[in-house]
Image (cartoon, helix red, strand yellow):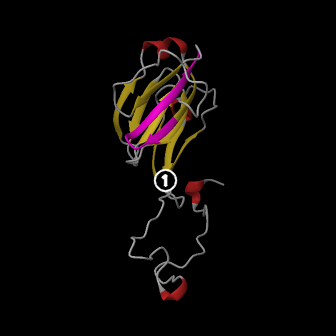
Amino acid sequence: MGLGSGHRVCSQPWVLGGSRGSRGRPWGRGLGHPVASRRVPPAALLKNNGRKEKSPSARPLLEIYSASGLLLAGIPWKSGRLVQLGWTASEDLLCIQEDGTVLIYNLFCEFKRHFSMGNEVLQNHVLEAKVFHTEYGTGAAILTGAHRFCWAPTAPPHGCPSSPPHGWPLA
């Protein structure tokens, strides 16, 4: 079953618009505070990444789906081996490759820009990567083959610390 073939990913059993909490007030509104909601990010998927064939039609496909499972866009993946996919706060897709290149696409698979994590990462490759969010923006943290951590915001400058942290929570 593929997501783009008309199958529903999830059902939404709640009633929109007419829901009321206790005392007849709309849910989430009390004491004059605005309603807050957490937005579900879109989903990105690289399909057929394990194929050994080299024909152009056998290339992996990068597909982006809405939170409700609708296919928004897709493109053949023509770049290097992906280690991690993640979303920025502004809904740009970060594609972190094994060589330390970070490619940035919008919701419709349109290329925006790229940057490199540097020569150290290029020489030692990416073992693992995480996309993180802070009050200052979104960034990428990676663990190199030399067991060093490097990080970058979604735009340079970036770098590797002189002494590595002891794990992902500290990175």
Q: Nearer the viewer, residue 63 or 162?
A: 162
Secondary structure of the magenta portion, mostly?
Answer: strand
- Say left or right for 90 vs 97: left
Task: Identify whether 166 is placed above or below 24.
Answer: above
Mark 1 residue crowding within 10 angstroms, few (<14) / some (14–19) / many (20+)? some
The three-letter code of the residue at mark 1 reads Pro
Among all residues in the image, which is located at the extreme right?
1
- The N terminus lies in which quarter of the figure? bottom right
The region drawn magenta spans 131-145
Q: Is residue 118 left or right of residue 146?
A: left
Q: Is residue 111 above or below residue 114?
A: below
- Residue 22 pos. (x, y %): 55, 84
Q: Is residue 133 magenta?
A: yes
Residue name at image x 64 percent, y 31 percent: 50
Q: Which residue is mark 1?
A: 41
Image quarter of residue 158: top left
Is the residue 114 above or below the residue 74 in the image? above
